[in-house]
Amino acid sequence: MPNDLSPTARAIRTLEILRARPGTTAGELAARLGVTDRAARRYVEILREAGIPVESARGPHGGYRLGRGTRLPPVHFTQAEALGLVMAVLGRTPAGTDSDDLVGTALDKVVKALPESVGRQAAMLREHASAAPDPYSTRPDPTVTSELVDAVAARRRIKVGYRSEAGDEWEEEVDPWSLVVRYGRWYLLCHSHRVDAIRTYRVDRVREVRPTPHGFDPPEGLDPVAVLEENLGLGWELATRVVFDAPLAEVARWIRPPMGRVEPLGEDRCVLVGSTRNPDMYAQEWLARVPFAFRVEGGEELRTAVAALGARFTAAAAEAAGPP
């Protein structure tokens, strides 16, 4: 290198060398810069003083390398990929159209970083598209979500503070198996040591996460989505049992996983066993859609909700059949 370069120029050159060749030793860096080993180490210190993480290690595989967060790998989007990214964000969160929102600002940065030929259509879509809010989607606290992800990755048992929809609060130890996003809602799939059973908790209702010194091993071959679907309808306060006068194969197509588990009762009948905290919703939004005769054999609260719904429909039909 020219001998008349300033310390700043040599520090920038040091950064370029470490980017191109991680693991460069002090001697190699000195040779590339045309300075002494001591001067090369000084340029590394200048980078560190500027807030650039430079890691060092001894040994045959040692040397200097840049820490995480110093640069992003090059990412190239096609126009279709850029449009697909914007559509995916807007399809999941209406806040993606808001430049003051966390997701909106991130999307805005991505679109602005795209070349004009690629990002033009994405920018127009970003500016002119609107998204209606999804009443069922929720966005958990990013800090809480990050703490849960860390615990899942480290297989570390945690203590969580939780607040139910009814306002009940409690703290318990859980083994966090996975986070699952289902229809715009984030769930924590875990083993609860409080009840010694699988539980699914809404992440947006987790108030606090604290680590414990205990580790855990998740079930072998765990399919988080399948296990979540199987357990969404279990563990709530009010037990339900509904018998259908139709074969299992026909009824199963109409049963959503949160309703519970459906099992055969001979060839022509089946039973749905589950639980709920909202019997009115269970009756109106779920059972009313199933096109087969059924009887509520378990759950007084659900029986009451079904009777009330039936009375409403009967009254509506009677009124419509009367004189104009």
Image (spheres, grey):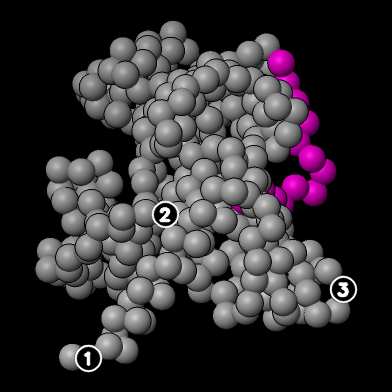
Q: Nearer the observer, disc 1 or disc 3? A: 1
Q: Residue at x 43, y 13 (%)?
A: 41
What numbered label is drawn on residue 323? 1
Q: Which residues are magenta?
A: 214-233
What numbered label is drawn on residue 184? 2
Mark 1 to mark 3: distance in Å?
46 Å
Q: Quadrant of residue 125?
A: bottom left
- How would you rate the neighbour count of disc 3 (Cα within 10 Å): few for under 14, some for 14-19, many for 20 or more? few
In the figure, 305 relative to 203: above or below? below
Callout 2 touching callout 3 (CB < 8 Å): no
User: Is 156 on the left or on the right of 286, as rendered?
Assistant: right
Which residue matches tag 3?
266
Please state which of residues 138 and 213 is positioned toward the viewer in this rendering.
138
In percent of width and height, residue 232 lies at 60, 49
Three-letter residue code for mark 2: Gly
Secondary structure category for the residue under label 2: loop
* Residue 269 lies within the magenta run: no
